[in-house]
Image: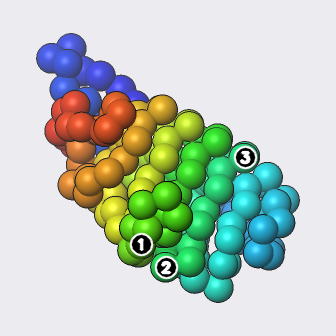
Amino acid sequence: MTLSLEGKMKIIKVDTKRFSKWEAPIMEHGKPTKYGWIVHHPENLKLGKFTDIGAFTYLNALYDIEIDEYAQFGSHCSIYSYSSIDEKKGKVIIGYNARIGSHTTIMPGITIGENSIVGANSFVTQDIPKNTFFAGCPARLIKELHE
């Protein structure tokens, strides 16, 4: 992420060379992938090419999770399509080139738009529009992102 002198955050560009040897990992229900993240109900996870999911991240895809190409997650994130605490459920969609900071929790039914950034340690309870930066607990709009 870069900041201009005017304080406007810029959209992070995709580095296609970084992912030249990318392959989707083998995913088994409740077992760590070779990258150290875990998915429950992998049959309901649509994983786009060139994604980067940090170690110790948990994905509960009972009601579907869709992660678009080039999306990146820091370590220790939790993405829930079902929450047993409040019985919420719904498909989670993470857009193209979205960036999710470490230790972030995304609740059921949330859509995070393309090129958006979610700051570390955030709790996402509302949809995040494309080209925006959200952070906090609960996550709220910090800035709109610009080319």
* Pointers 2 and 1 in contact (C-beta within 8 Å): yes
Q: In percent of the image, x 52 and y 64: which residue is there?
A: 84
Residue 26 lies in what quarter of the image? bottom right
Q: Work out how far the residue at label 1 is from the one at label 3, CA to CA, in angstroms.
A: 24 Å
Give the mark toward the camera: 3 or 2: 2
Q: Amino acid at mark 2?
A: Tyr
Q: Position of residue 11 (x, y in %)?
A: 30, 42
Q: SS for tag 1?
A: strand
> Which residue carries the number 3 mark?
55
> Which residue carries the number 1 mark?
89
Q: Nearer the viewer, residue 26 or 90?
A: 90
**Is 93 left or right of 47, judged from the image as shown?**
left
> Which residue carries the number 2 mark?
63
Crowding at dot 3, Cα within 10 Å, few <14 / some 14-19 / many 20+, comes out as: some
Residue 140 drawn above or below residue 60: above
Residue 96 drawn above or below residue 76: below
Crowding at dot 1, Cα within 10 Å, few <14 / some 14-19 / many 20+, comes out as: some
Q: Earlier in the sequence, mark 2 or mark 1?
A: 2
Q: In percent of the image, x 44 and y 53: which residue is there?
A: 106
Q: Work out how far the residue at label 3 is from the one at label 2, CA to CA, in angstroms.
A: 22 Å
Q: In percent of the image, x 41 and y 72: which residue is there?
A: 89
Q: Residue furthest bottom?
A: 43
